[in-house]
Image (cartoon, rainbow, N blue to C red):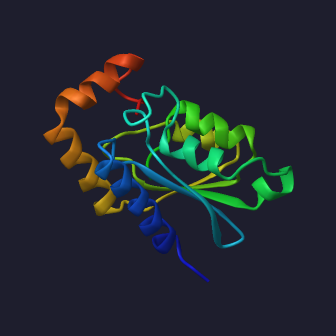
Amino acid sequence: MKSDNYFMSEAIKEAEKSLAEGGLPIGSVLVRDGEIISRGHNRLIQNNSVILHAEMDAIENAGRLCYDDYRRCCLYTTLSPCPMCSGAVILYNIPRVVIGDNTTLMGAENLLKCNDVEVVVLNDITCRDLFLEFSCNNCEIWDDELNKVGNTTESR
């Protein structure tokens, strides 16, 4: 059986894909029964989108699943999910979220936990370093994204 670290490495590939496209280096994969069923990465900049965070992209790319399918899923994301992405996890009854890093950004993990979602934080240094390097080297882009949502603690 594939490990959390394996699936996180796949989410990191999505983050790197976003970075190569000129976007924010955040990636996600949705896994059902131990197999990746969809992938996503942050597309805010590339698509001039207000909602295409990596997690939303992965959930969207899975298509419309039935309730039982979502209940068998786990969402892997390189950074802590924001309130919007956490809300989607709750809405679709995804029971488990694995986070690569939550030191660079703390999302709505408490919201997930209060809604009986299992939250696992891997403290993956690659996830952390990808985002820190981007935000340091592209502070004007990151500051612009933060200013659009008006929140510097739970925004991506």
Which residue is at the far left? 137
Q: Nearer the viewer, residue 112 or 84?
A: 84
Location of the C terminus (image quadrant): top left
Position of residue 91 relative to residue 18, above or below, is above
Q: Nearer the viewer, residue 27 or 80?
A: 27
Q: Dividing the picture into quarters, in which one does residue 123 lie?
A: bottom left
Residue occupying the point 27% across, 53% down: 130
Q: Extreme bottom residue here?
A: 1
Residue 4 horizontal/vertical position (percent): 52, 70
Q: How many marks?
A: 0
Where residue 28 appears, as percent x and y from the top left, is 50, 54
**At x 29% / y 52%, what residue is drawn?**
20
Image location of residue 98, percent across then percent down? 53, 58
Q: Is residue 115 above or below residue 62?
A: above
Q: Residue at x 33, y 41 (%)?
A: 23
User: Residue 71: in sight, yes or no?
Assistant: yes
Residue 63 point in image, percent of width and height: 72, 49
Answer with the quarter of the image where residue 34 lies.
Answer: bottom right
Left or right: residue 101 compared with residue 69: left
Q: Is residue 57 left or right of residue 136?
A: right
Residue 77 in view here = no
Q: Is residue 98 left or right of residue 67?
A: left
The residue sitting at 33% across, 42% down in the picture is 24
Query: Where the N terminus falls, by quadrant?
Result: bottom right
